[in-house]
Amino acid sequence: MHWIRHPKDFWSGVMFVAIGIGAIAVSSTYPLGTAARMGPGYFPRMLGILLIVLGALLGLRAVRGPRTASDPIPPWKLRPLVGVLGSVVVFGLIVHYVGVLLGTVFLIVAASAASHEFRPKESVIAGVLLGALAVGVFIIGLKLQLPIWPFQH
Amino acid sequence: MELLNNLALGFSVALTFTNIMYAFIGVMLGTLIGVLPGIGPVATIAMLLPTTYALQPVSALIMLAGIYYGAQYGGSTTAILVNMPGESSSVVTCLDGHQMARRGQAGAALATAALASFFAGTCATVLVAAVGKPLSELALKFGPAEYFSLMVLGLLGAVVLAHGSVLKAVAMIVLGLLMGIIGTDVNSGMQRFSFGIPELTDGIGVVVIAMGLFGFAEIITNLESAEKREIITSKISGLWLSKEQFKKAWPAVLRGTGLGSVLGVLPGGGAMLSSFASYTVEKKMAKDPSEFGKGAIQGVAGPESANNAGAQTSFIPLLTLGIPENAVMAMMVGAMTIHNIQPGPQVVTSNPQLFWGLIASMWIGNLMLVVLNLPLIGMWIKLLRVPYRLLYPAILLFCAIGVYSINNASFDITMTAIFGLVGVLFMKLGCEPAPLLLGFVLGPMMEENLRRALLLSRGDPLTFVQRPISLGLLIAAALLLLIIFLPTVRKKREEAFHEEVA
């Protein structure tokens, strides 16, 4: 799509317009009220309109503006994304059942795998050490209500 | 005299054993994250916020504030020794600080940075104490219209002084404002944008957003780029300055402190802007500008004093007006709200212990930082050798446990991960997350003041321009916007932030 001169600006414009439309659509069910007595729908709709205007300006400028050095959007890389976010989400889901110690070992190994410098053995050792540290700091020190061992609940 | 009494009250709060301890933890952690590239004060404060629930509000704020100004000290160490900014505000310190280190003057550079920061920190503390009370008394006279206009000015100021596209930054603010109203509407009790999810009735937590956008997204982008860092670990000897170096450095420190103190108070200002501005000034003032970039001591002394002064004076708008001017201050608003303190001009009178205790602790914290950063420098250098592949999983672990502990539920972690994904998208599209965070914390306040102002004026929007203070604030905001669209200023602004992008 060579008519898009600034892909970053263009697609962020599209994003803002889409969010603006979404905000107006959702808040259209909220009472609008009047300027003197604003209902819960007044401010969100105002912001939605503003967002659409700003997004449209951004998008238009990216298509019609002067052709300067292009700024391509950097490609998505799956490994860091899935590794980092996945390890944290799964940790949140299982920590209640498997306890902090095992949960930490899982989190550290899975998160380390997100890097291209991944060293499996090293990450297991780091996981065990950090697990012990987490138990010491968060459960013994700060007294968080979390199980240490699996299936304590 | 009143000031002395107030400061005495402050020191009596700050010098209790507990508060000294929390100040120490704060500046220690601040130095740590300042030294380590890849995690900034916003993400760190987000990480620690949940653990402060049980603390006294003043202890919590003392610790969190220490993280911000402590990071200014630590950041310079990495800049000088590794030629990599440990903190965004020490980007310019790399230029001359690292050159000094390569010429075998690492000790002098480190000493300059620490002493300049300490001097600036002391002056800024006095300044915060001196203007804090009068400014908040003025702000108490503000009505809703004035407050609304002040927030407009504050938010637009954040855009002008931030780097990147102005349009994008304004759009990010609006998006932040929208996200800020998620949850129960205080006036009608109606659920807005919560999509029937019970966890969203109280809105999204500031911790969740900050950690996702700043913490997780940053780690993911770091892993994507996979750059190698090279560490200069030559022996550091003589942590002191020669007489000539001292003579060259002190005027720069004075100028840096002054500049940083002023820029710190402005909306959008703070540590980073101050250090950039100071470097430019020093280069202009120098007898021999060609020295710059080759190890000019003024290039370290000026920006290092400026960033520390700026970091501290940026507390002024927060403590007196309740308006955060940068992302770190937005986190402080979050911290105050968690402890049921409504940030604003009434804090000085309703919580004098908190107000003055926090100010006094800043000076104590600065004193601790000199000790932490000069005699103990060796410890931080060792830390720099820890490879990133070991560091980031540990950061993630502390984030995950911190977020989980807010409600003891996995929902918050999942939300944080979603914001991490959104944050990566923002970075790919070149959208700065800081304006969004500012909008987010100001969203509910802004709606409330708009509502009240228009209720008082019976729906007449002209109220904002008919009241003189409000009009003045709006004119200032309009001028800011106008200035930035002037072609010459625009070009200069792009130049000023160029070094940082490179």
Image (spheres, helix red, strand yellow):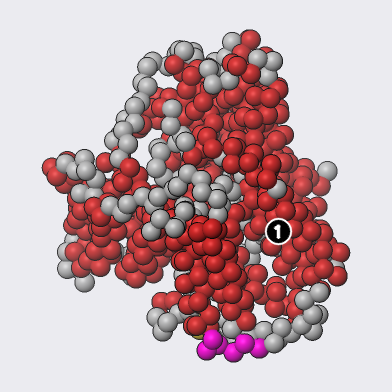
Q: Chain of mark 1?
A: B
Q: Quadrant of the N terminus of chain B?
A: top right
Q: Position of residue B501 (x, y in %)?
A: 49, 39
Q: Is residue B21 visible?
A: no
Give the image location of residue B207, x and y in percent.
Answer: 46, 61
Corner quadrant of residue A28:
bottom right
Tell me the SS state at disc 1. helix
Q: Residue placed at 35% from the left, 25% from the top?
A: B231
**Is residue B135 visible to the viewer in this orientation of the structure?**
yes
Q: Which residue occupies the extreme left position in the image?
A: A121
Q: Is residue B51 left or right of residue B225?
A: right
Where residue B213 sits in the image (x, y, percent)?
43, 57
- Residue B487 relative to residue B175: left or right: right
Magenta-highlighted residues: A28-33
- Please tell me how many numbered marks the rendered image carries: 1
| Mark 1 neighbour density, 10 Å: few (under 14) some (14–19) many (20 or more) | many
Residue B436 lies in the magenta stretch: no
Percent from the top left, x then y, of residue B421?
A: 36, 60
Q: Is residue A121 left or right of residue B406?
A: left
Tag 1 residue: B153
Please state if B45 lies on the left or on the right of A78 as rendered.
right
**Which residue is located at x 59 percent, y 54 percent?**
B166
Q: Main secondary structure of the magenta part?
A: loop
Residue A114, compared with residue B443, is above or below; it is: above
Q: Is residue A29 magenta?
A: yes
Residue depicted at 62% across the width and 29% down the height: B279
For badge 1, the amino acid type reads Leu
Q: Nearer the viewer, residue B499 or B416?
A: B499
Quarter residue B277 falls in: top right
In the image shown, does B199 or B422 lie closer to the viewer?
B422
Residue at the image position 47 percent from the left and 72 percent from the top: A18
